[in-house]
Image (tube, rainbow, N blue to C red):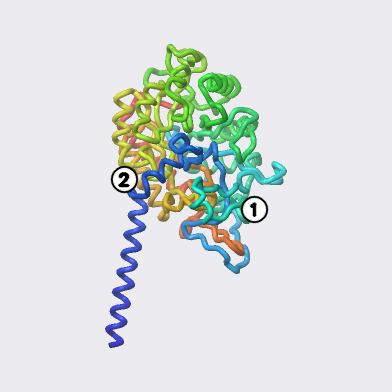
Amino acid sequence: MAKFRRRTCIILSLFILFIFSLMMGLKLLRPNSATFGAPFGLDLLPELHQQTIHLGKKTDFQKSDRINSETNTKNLKSVEITMKPSKTSELNLEELPPLNYFLHVFYYSWYGNPQFDGKYIHWNHPVLEHWDPRIAKNYPQGRHSPPDDIGSSFYPELGSYSSRDPTVIETHMRQMRSASIGVLALSWYPPDSSDENGEATDNLVPTILDKAHKYNLKVTFHIEPYNNRDDENMYKNVKYIIDKYGNHPAFYRYKTKTGNALPMFYVYDSYITKPEKWANLLTTSGSQSVRNSPYDGLFIALLVEEKHKYDILKSGFDGIYTYFATNGFTYGSSHQNWANLKYFCDKYNLIFIPSVGPGYIDTSIRPWNSQNTRNRINGKYYEVALSAALQTHPSLISITSFNEWHEGTQIEKAVPKRTSNTVYLDYRPHKPSLYLELTRKWSEKYSKDRTTYTSDQHSS
């Protein structure tokens, strides 16, 4: 009888393990048709819901709390443990493969701490309230309290750093260089403006350009949805960027099929502005047209819903990107739709730039949003996304993100950390450099593959 019970227990345990593994696999590869709630996905995005709380990142880019997790646990009665940054973990840069200028990564310079900024910025992100009061009442409110309690489910190897710290900027450039990423797409707000949880960062651009140049990296601009963004002030801001930074050797230009080397601008939440407004800026007959002028460029729109394809065409954009690191969250971020999007772009001579990411978890700042978490599965989620992107033979690939810690999409080094009431997620059993190493591996593969299907496009 005892043997029978033991055998039954073993069989039951194996069955439970099998079910758990199956669920993890489904979580990883969840397609856009999955029933995570059609209304729930898109109502987080501006104009697709009456509020502008969106899953992708900024504008209302409020962020913070430690109510989390993929596996975070609270109320642990343990002493705080933080791993020290590794000092010699970088590879010898001379031994690394060449930079891949067709691989871009989204970069954020909005973090601050008392040493450099007089206070914490972004690490103390507020916990965002759900728009439905019936749901909101079930979750805590307040702000995070750095340095031990930050608005992220992971903890940076560099701690709660300041984006103004030149040593931090240099370390970031070294990490990107070690990953064979050629271009960083810098989150940008006009001078004297910022997202609502941050402060102005345009004055950091010269230092970022200088540090990038030291490692032969290039910098392009990711235009955020600043207040009252429209065709007129976009013209002024594009002019400002090109006039002020366009002569720097690290300023990125992409060489088109016609041989023109043009600046590139990713335009986040482009769908908020009506196509007629964008057409004023982006078509040759527009009233604020940049076309065939010193301020011409390649303007890349964010595609969220399938119907945005036709608005993007009407607007005069030069390409599309998908930003979100959540397979299945939007039409654009769902891997299964990338082949169709690439076909559409080829048909209308647009650049298709799929965005890949290592995972997603924003429950430290949106505790009610666990259903959009995407487990990293020790790098497998990232590799699935990179493989799906390569299959479309894209001209460029973008990575979400280098350091968007609030949404857990970072490839920057993270370390194990636990405090008396929080355990942060980390990359174990692998090293803090896991996602940089995976990026380098796939950057090399992409570089080789790309030469087989393109011969006339270059970056400079």
| Residue 221 left/right relative to 192 | left
Whole-percent x, y for residue 383 in the image = 38, 47
The residue indicated by pointer 2 is 33
Q: What amino acid is found at the position of numbered circle 2 in the picture?
A: Ser
Mark nearer the N terminus (1 vs 2): 2
Task: Using the image as rendered, state which of residue 116 and residue 157 is in the foreground.
Answer: 116
Q: Tell whether label 2 touches label 1 (CB within 8 Å).
A: no
Q: Quadrant of the N terminus?
A: bottom left
The residues bearing labels 1 and 2 have C-alpha atoms spaced at a distance of 38 Å
The residue indicated by pointer 1 is 145
Q: In the image, is residue 218 above or below residue 160?
A: above
Q: Residue at x 70, y 45 (%)?
A: 119
Q: Residue at x 41, y 41 (%)?
A: 42
* Label placed on residue 121: none
Which is in the foreground here, disc 1 or disc 2?
2
Task: Using the image as rendered, state which of residue 226 and residue 47 is in the foreground.
Answer: 47
Task: Using the image as rendered, state which of residue 380 and residue 118 is in the foreground.
Answer: 118
Q: Residue at x 65, y 31 (%)?
A: 203
Q: Secondary structure at mark 1?
A: loop
Q: Secondary structure at mark 2?
A: loop
Q: What amino acid is found at the position of numbered circle 1 in the picture?
A: Ser
Locate residue 247: give its quadrant.
top right
